[in-house]
Amino acid sequence: MANRGRNEGTIFRKPNGTWMAQVSIDGKRISHGSKSRAECHDWIRKMLDQIDQGMTFEGRNLTLSAYLRDWIAIKKNAVRANTGNQYEKLISLYIGPELGKFKMKELNIRVVNQFYERLKNQDIGISNIQYAHRVLHAALEQAVRSGIIGRNPAHGATLPRRVHREMQILNEQQVNLFLIAACNSRYRSLYHLAVKTGMRFSELRGLSWPDVDWIRGTITVNRQIQDITGLGSVSGAPKTFSGTRTILLGEMILNELKDQKRRVEEESKGCRGWRDNDLIFPSSIGTPFSKTDVQRDFVKVLQSANVRRIRFHDLRHTAASLMLNHGVPALVVSKILGHSNPSVTLSIYAHSTLDMQSQAASIMDEIVTPIPVRIQDLQPSATNCNR
């Protein structure tokens, strides 16, 4: 039997023993099922509060994509430019493609949890997933305050656990063996640039020839390319604001890039279906190279060099460690890697700073070494004191 009060909605028990609550918005009825009458009463109370705040029936049919478009436009005026750009990037790369088609009323914690799991399976970094969660949660929290939804479906979601993997770093000899073994590899120049600059995999994919200044001997990182489910290879800004950077290159790597440019030009002439994207490291048809193809070749080269198997990302760690261990200031290393500040670099590569401390300890031993002497030899004579 239904319990109805004026402007209080309706609650009734279904034949299967569960409860149903209903309220009317703009003359149209919306319902909510629950296992208890108390929960139905709470839902009605929240819905009536939201109706009082201006929630409309049309608002409940709003898609997340449409809502986020309006939300980010307002949010960017309330935060720093860099922060707003990062929010917009996360929405366009991850949230929008995966969840944008859902109506606001269809979002729930299960949908959100599945979204985070999909990102993890795409090898999206845990920090990026956590950042995407913060943006999504903030946007949906505003939707709750605006009366568009009754509760935040991202609240209490389960985020993938951050796994701290042990860094596998190659020493100088192993790096040289690796690069020698890569001489005949299609990706030899890619490996050279990765190990000498510490660029991220996605940044290497996004490099184009206009990024190289042959006169100044520099290369600029201003975009990355990532694979997004349903969209393919998507180009976007670097991971962070500091990720946009210009790196000075040595003569050897510049010559390597010149060889790479000749190889790409020859390859493009011999391919009828070539797609000219002006990429430094294209696939065999000019598109962004495949992660799978590079990974397969990378493992093959490591085996040929008789070097232990590492992740491609470990070339970044190797570059950072080699620079720090050879006295390159942490500030310079952080700029090359695209870190926000040197403290980030030092916190990640603490093992390298320990190696540097060994040299520092030896230097301090030489500088501060007391020589045993008799105390009386140091005391001035009585004659000298009376002068």
Image (tube, grey):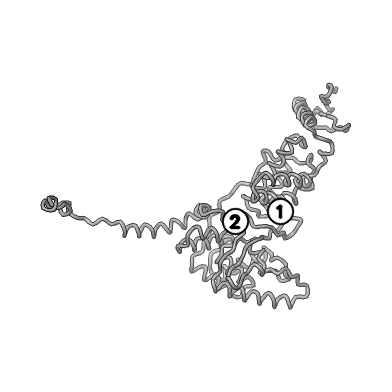
Residue 286 lies left or right of residue 311; in this view the side is right
Q: Residue furthest left?
A: 383
Residue 118 visible in image: no
Q: Which mark is residue 93?
A: 1
In terms of image quadrants, where is residue 15? Answer: top right
Mark 2 / mark 1, whichever is N-terminal = 1
Q: Which mark is residue 242?
A: 2
Residue 377 visible in image: yes
Label 1: which secondary element: helix
In terms of image quadrants, where is residue 141? Answer: top right
Residue 154 lies left or right of residue 333; in this view the side is right
Amino acid type assigned to the residue bearing label 2 in the image: Ser
Residue 108 location (% of width, % of height): 74, 40
> Viewer-nearest of labels 2 and 1?
2
> In which quadrant will I find the N terminus?
top right
For label 2, count other residues whose C-alpha is less than 10 Å away and answer few (under 14), some (14-19) or many (20+).
Answer: some
Residue 374 location (% of width, % of height): 17, 53
For label 1, count other residues whose C-alpha is less than 10 Å away and answer few (under 14), some (14-19) or many (20+).
Answer: some
Residue 219 location (% of width, % of height): 60, 67
Q: Residue furthest right?
A: 27
In terms of image quadrants, where is residue 255? Answer: bottom right
Amino acid type assigned to the residue bearing label 1 in the image: Leu
Q: Residue at x 68, y 45 (%)?
A: 135
In this view, 86 is above or below 234: above
Q: Residue at x 72, y 75 (%)?
A: 268
In this view, 387 is above or below 259: above
The number of discs equals 2
Task: Pick the residue in front: 301 or 224.
Answer: 224
Q: CA distance from mark 2 to mark 1?
A: 19 Å
